[in-house]
Image (cartoon, helix red, strand yellow):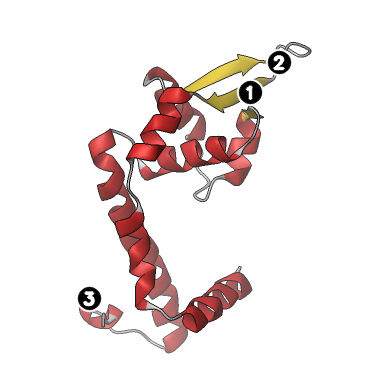
Amino acid sequence: MGDIAKDIKSKFPNERVKALINLKYTAHWLDSLGNKVVKPYNISIQQYNILRILKGASTPITVNTVKERMIEKSPNSTRLMDKLCEKGFIERVRCENDRRVVYIKINEEGIKLLEEIDMTGFEKVMDKLTEEEVIILNRLLDKIR
């Protein structure tokens, strides 16, 4: 079992500060793990998230809708979508009624890429917790936010 104090060789003034640092450290650790999974596919974990959002949407959605649904809100999400477009995984579609509105949709290449990426190893980190512990963790994280 990990111990944040040993992992970062630090002491904390109290358990609340320790928990806060532990949350940030664990979130970064999970991001790094996720990035290792998607790196061979030449995308970032944020781009993977965008592809999943678009796949989950039954129709093309606006750039702002994608931004709202992203796990990690990023000021460069438009650039991330530009890169996915350049790589041929998503497409932009102009609204016929209002040319200022741009819709984004995943294409067949993007769907194939998502099917190719195996996230089971990444998701297995949660197997260390019981179902009851996962429920408690979710409640606590929701309570913090």
Q: In this view of the protein, which residue sits in the foreground, 21 or 27?
A: 27
> How many tags in the picture?
3
Task: Mark 1: give few (<14), some (14-19) or many (20+) Cα within 10 Å.
Answer: some
User: Please, what is the three-letter code of the amino acid marked with disc 3?
Assistant: Asp
Quadrant of the drawing holding the N terminus: bottom left
- Of circles 2 and 3, the one toward us is 2
Name the secondary structure under disc 1. strand
Residue at mark 1: 103
Kindly identify the residue that appears in the image at 49 percent across and 23 percent down: 107
For the point 60% across and 45% down, the residue is 69
Q: Identify the residue position indicated by label 2 in the image.
A: 95
Residue type, numbered disc 2 = Cys
- The spot of residue 101 in percent (x, y) is 69, 20
| Amino acid type assigned to the residue bearing label 1 in the image | Tyr
Q: Quadrant of residue 129?
A: bottom left
Farthest bottom residue in view: 14
- Above or below residue 6? Residue 106 is above
Residue found 28% across the figure and 35% down from its top: 41
Q: Is residue 25 above or below residue 89?
A: below
Q: Earlier in the sequence, mark 2 or mark 1?
A: 2
